[in-house]
Amino acid sequence: MADKIINASGNCNYISGNKVFILDKISTETCAELIGNLSNMVDDLPWAPGVQIPAMGGGIKNPYILPDNAPSVVDVYINSTGGELDTYRSIMTLLNLARSKGAIIRTTVMGAACSCASLIAIQGTPNFRIMYEESYNMIHYGRSSLRIDKINEIDNAQVYETTNRSKFIEPYLKYTGLTKQELTQLQKTEYGHKFVDECLQKKLCDWILTRDGKFIHK
């Protein structure tokens, strides 16, 4: 794929080469073109599932400087307040297809990674999740999309919500150091903000990019 911006719709969520920019609300409307282009980009990636992914313990001091034999990289740059779970799942499906082909999913939070955008940020390839020094991550319960207009639907809706929300927190339990109790506390408010020092401590990221251009990690 040519290294040029593919953004016919003019949306703030778009692809340029192997770079994915999520700079707006995550919704069907704002991400339709991005999802189509991301699918094409994943199709173009070579199959290399056996390639060894570099680790920080192997001497990596900068997640953007990789050895010559490193796998393909898909960069995801994030500054988004989040949006729709179903659209987020579409994006993650394609990113995980790229991962299945052996690609590194390198996520960089430039400003805000809230709600669904937070989920995308934390699910980058371990050791390749970056946050800028002034950025933050926001975790919350979210808003239900269900519209109940029949009394006998209430119980079914409750089952759906419980299942859906458990799926929402599973990536945090798998990819970060947050406990279920900590997540429950964060979801009690719309202000579950985590700034970079705590994100690094709780393993919501692996690196902090400082104002003077240095990368630091625990």
Image: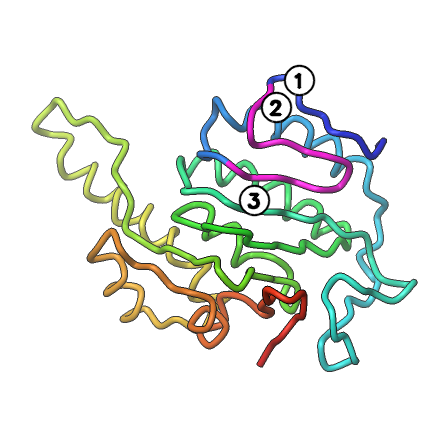
Image x and y of residue 173, in percent: 42, 66
Which badge, 2 or 3, comes first in the chain's sequence?
2
Q: How many marks?
A: 3
Disc 1 vs disc 2: which is toward the camera?
A: 1
**Residue at horizontal 41%, vertical 42%?**
81
The answer to whether 110 appears left or right of 119 in the picture is right
Q: Nearer the viewer, residue 70 or 43?
A: 70
C-alpha gap between disc 3 and disc 1: 22 Å
**Residue at horizontal 54%, vertical 28%?**
31
**For mark 3, what is the residue?**
92
**For mark 1, what is the residue?**
8
Would you place residue 207 above or below residue 2 in this image?
below
Would you place residue 190 above or below residue 148 in this image?
below
Q: Which residues are magenta?
A: 10-23
Q: Amino acid at mark 2?
A: Glu
Q: Residue furthest right?
A: 68
Which badge, 3 or 1, comes first in the chain's sequence?
1
Cβ atoms under marks 2 and 3 closer than 8 Å = no
**For mark 2, what is the residue?**
33
Image x and y of residue 85, in percent: 41, 39
Q: Amino acid at mark 1?
A: Ala
**Residue at horizontal 50%, vertical 40%?**
89
Cβ atoms under marks 1 and 2 closer than 8 Å = yes
Disc 2 vs disc 3: which is toward the camera?
A: 2
Image x and y of residue 131, in percent: 55, 61
